[in-house]
Amino acid sequence: MAVTKIRRISSWTLLVCAVISVVVFAMFYLGGTVDPSAEMKEPVYTGLLINWMYVIFAITAVSTILFAIWQFIGSLRTNAKSALLGLGVIVLFFVLMFVCYTIGDGTPLPIVSADTAKYNVPFWLKVSDMWLYSTYVLLGLTVLAILWGSVKKIFSK
């Protein structure tokens, strides 16, 4: 009963988010431009697209954190070792972010326009490097996990 309810809620949530995303992308690509004679054309609904991405990102981040806390508390009651292992993964994730931020380069870039000058400071440059490097590391770990799972499955037969 509970699984069916969870599946139904998650299916409807996915469907609603997908429909809204399709509508927003259609408005962005088909909505025209602010100034058709400009050299660099700006779509009318750029702000809407960016705001929708912020909403989706915020919902994802908040729900991920809440479900992680919920799972940690539930696991702590039944299996403390498993709960601490999950907490260790979160700690390692933040260590990865710190290391990637530390190795990021803060050297200012040649400024293209005055609008980008506020982001051409060491903090934002290191943050962007942190996200890039952590994406590379997590992508590599994902590929390794897929390969490990395949090899483990082959040898377990």
Image (cartoon, rainbow, N blue to C red):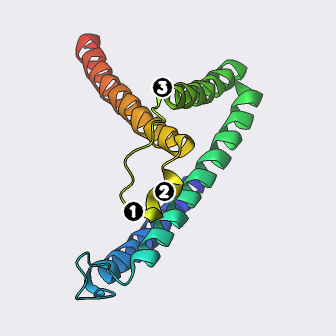
Which residue is under mark 2?
117
When the figure is inspected, residue 139 is found, relative to residue 18, above or below; the finding is above
The answer to which quarter of the image holds residue 123 is top right
**Residue at (25, 11) in percent of width and height:** 155
Element marked by disc 1: loop
Q: Is residue 133 above or below residue 113?
A: above
- In x, y percent, where is residue 15? 42, 70
| Disc 3: which residue | 103
Residue 39 falls left or right of residue 43: left
**Do the residues under discs 2 and 1 have CB atoms within 8 angstroms?**
yes
- For the point 22% across and 88% down, which residue is it? 37
How many residues crowd mark 3 within 10 Å: few (<14), some (14–19), many (20+)? few
Q: Position of residue 128 (x, y in %)?
A: 46, 43
Q: Is residue 6 visible?
A: no
Q: In terms of secondary structure, where does tag 2 sit? A: helix
| Label 1 CA crowd tier, 10 Å (few <14, some 14–19, many 20+) | few
Which circle's residue, 1 or 3, is located before the other in the chain? 3
Figure check: 145 above or below 124: above
Which label number is shown at residue 113?
1
Q: Which image quadrant for residue 81?
A: top right
Can you tell which of label 2 and label 3 is closer to the viewer?
Answer: 2
User: Camera-side residue: 115 or 142?
Assistant: 115
Snapshot quadrant of residue 70: top right
